[in-house]
Amino acid sequence: MSNLNREEAIKATSLDLVKKVESENVDFTNRVTGNGNTEFSASVTFQDEDGQGTLTMLVLVPDEVVNAHDELDGIDWDKYIAEAEYQVY
């Protein structure tokens, strides 16, 4: 499964689904990136002609930004969501 940019995710699903996943709360994925970033994700499920699917948004935030905040609410999520990648499965 390859990662999609926002426009590709919209074509693969819909603008409404992309906006919906972007409005969800993100959580740690616990995957080690090894590139100085912490990975977060959010997912939504949907129904289409092929059955049920899932749209997942992957958000990378620099480790120093994550470490500088006691609470994740202090992170400028819009900045990092704008650079998110998506997976559809």
Image: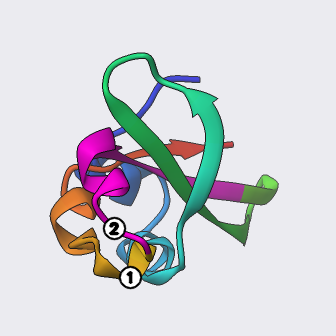
Locate residue 52 relative to residue 72 in the image: left or right: right
Determine the residue positioned at 31% across, 50% down.
84
Locate residue 78 relative to residue 51 in the image: left or right: left
Q: Nearer the viewer, residue 72 or 57?
A: 72
- Mark 2 surroundings within 10 Å by alpha-carbon count, few (fewer than 14), some (14 through 19), many (20 or more): few
Q: Which residues are magenta?
A: 54-70
Magenta stretch: includes residue 60: yes
Q: Nearer the viewer, residue 37 or 71?
A: 71
Residue 45 screen position, x and y as percent? 72, 68
Tag 1: amino acid: Asp
Residue at the far right: name it: 51
Q: Nearer the viewer, residue 69 or 50?
A: 69
- Give the Cα distance between marks 2 and 1: 8 Å
Determine the residue positioned at 63% across, 45% down.
29
Q: Is residue 83 above or below residue 47?
A: above
| SS at mark 2 in the image | loop
Locate residue 61 relative to residue 14 in the image: left or right: left
Determine the residue positioned at 28% across, 71% down.
75
Q: Which residue is mark 2?
A: 69
Q: Quadrant of residue 80?
A: bottom left
- Mark 1 surroundings within 10 Å by alpha-carbon count, few (fewer than 14), some (14 through 19), many (20 or more): few
Residue 46 — which label? none
Residue 26 screen position, x and y as percent? 53, 67
Q: Is residue 11 above or below residue 4?
A: below
Q: Nearer the viewer, residue 61 or 17?
A: 61
Determine the residue positioned at 42% across, 71% down.
70
